Image: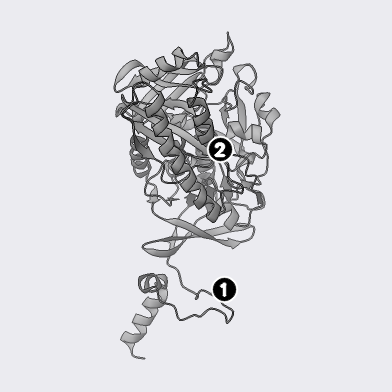
Amino acid sequence: MNRREFSKSVLAAGMGISTGATTGVSTTAANASGEYYEEPTKRLPVRKFDVVVAGAGTGGVVAAIAAARQGAKTALIEVKGYPGGTVTEGGTALHSFYNLWKAFPGVAKRQVVQGIPQEIVDHLLKIGGCSGHAEMTEGYTYDSVCTCIDTELYKLTAFEMLVEAGVHVFVNTLLVGAILDRPRLRGVIVESRSGREAFYAKSFVDCTAYGDLAAYAGARYTEPNDYPVCNSVGIGNVDIDKYYAFLQAHNAKGQLARGLRSGQPDQIVRAGAEAISVPGLAEAARALGMGMITTTVHDNYFMFIKCNFKMPVSPTNRDQFAKAELEVRRRMAKAVEIFRKYVPGCEKAFMARTSPKLCIRRGRLIQCDYDITLPDVLEARHFDDEVMVYGFHDSAPRYQVRNGGTYGIPYRALRVAGIENLLACGMMITSNHDAHMSTRNTVCCMGQGQGAGTAAALCAAKNCGTRDLGYGALRDALNKAGVYFES
């Protein structure tokens, strides 16, 4: 082999996946029975970071911004072409930046989630993409405020804030594996149209919602399958004021909030009822698993109407998930028909937006160093290592945080058990379903993200594991970043 041929062979070996991905050709054969196929060994190009955040969803966006602002070279991996996750796909209303003060006369109003999540709201307000923290005037035993957002502007705002913070954003990129040196996670394997690569880092945060990174890393987990999946349809050519009048005419008790809509203050931005007795409508909505509550920041547009479906197995099951995708899309089309038929001002309604795939409320439940309990939530318990406080429960008024107070999310609840440099946040933590009905909510996930991203960056800077990080340093960093604590 001459020098030129040797150089070419080394380059091909080093780029391994690039040649394979381009041609799609492999010389390795399946076994004689055809029961499996053995992939050829490949040398993957390596990129090195301080922190890798998997998933650019509700918590992942905030985690990545927080890590980068701490000076960490941060990679954010996202399978879709934009950041935002459930915030932009599941509900379009953020619950909740405040304590439940309106349900408890005499309790002080407090904004208990601030920091980076509030910065996102501030950016959206500047470009007409948010209602502001609109106070609930009806249904306030559920929440005292409703913060409605424009889904498309949220995607743009999140993307811009990530880039401004210096995050290396890898969208259209799939997380496909983990590189382990137990009990330490050394890197992750990703795949995109650019090929297959390895990202090495010192610290990692799993914000995938499904717990993909934790599962690849060998973390202990269960799959409770204790929620329905859903998709939300945005409906255009509608009138939310007439919708609210329709609900009132039928004595449908529900929710109402007024805020900024199409740039005008004191407009209805959230309206709907938990149940409605209109013959035909009630039965049709129930059959579709359709909610009757919606939000908007624009005239003539319902930002979302949810349709739910309970899968027989965990949403990690690809084949059953595909069946659910079709079923829910059929339901959304019928939902639009129902609004056309029954609701004044919706006679010419049309489907304007859907989520690109089903939203989940829980996939894998990852075992962490601490498991938040229902008494922790309802009794407003606080901890000596908390990264945020929170005061909303999605099952209110049945369950409420005591006396309109808050409970703490402890740092130890984010540390993945058995792995020394991996944190998890969002809907992957908290085993008890009723406690999870609080910790899984959007603003709580955002706050957890700021705590996890900050901790990951500090661990990377100190070259230590998540359990070796002193809480004092973490608390100081969170205080400086505007995170609210009760004391």
**Front tag of 1 and 2:** 1
Which quadrant of the structure image shows residue 471? top right
Query: Tag 2, which secondary structure?
Result: helix
Image location (x, y in percent) of residue 49? 45, 55
Residue neighbourhood size for the residue with mark 2, other residues' Cα within 10 Å, grouped as few (<14), some (14–19), many (≥20):
many
User: How far, Cα to Cα, is label 1 from label 2?
Assistant: 47 Å
User: Which label number is shown at residue 11?
Assistant: none
Residue at 47% across, 26% down: 292
Residue 377 lies, with reference to residue 265, above or below; the image says below
Residue at 58% across, 41% down: 310
Q: Residue furthest front?
A: 279
Q: Residue furthest bottom?
A: 1
Q: Which residue is mark 2?
A: 474
Q: Quadrant of the C terminus?
A: top right
Which quadrant of the structure image shows residue 162? top left
**Number of numbered discs visible in the structure rendering:** 2
Query: Observer-nearest residue: 421 or 178?
Result: 178
Is residue 70 visible in the rendered image? The answer is no
Image location (x, y in percent) of residue 207? 51, 45
Residue at 33% across, 39% down: 156
Residue neighbourhood size for the residue with mark 1, other residues' Cα within 10 Å, grouped as few (<14), some (14–19), many (≥20):
few
Residue 204 lies, with reference to residue 5, above or below; the image says above
Image location (x, y in percent) of residue 154? 37, 36
Of the residues under marks 1 and 2, which one precedes in the sequence?
Answer: 1
Residue at 50% across, 35% down: 288
Residue 379 lies, with reference to residue 353, above or below; the image says above
User: Which label number is shown at residue 36?
Assistant: 1
Give the amino acid type for the residue marked by disc 2 in the picture: Leu
Q: Quadrant of the N terminus?
A: bottom left
Q: Is residue 374 left or right of residue 172?
A: right
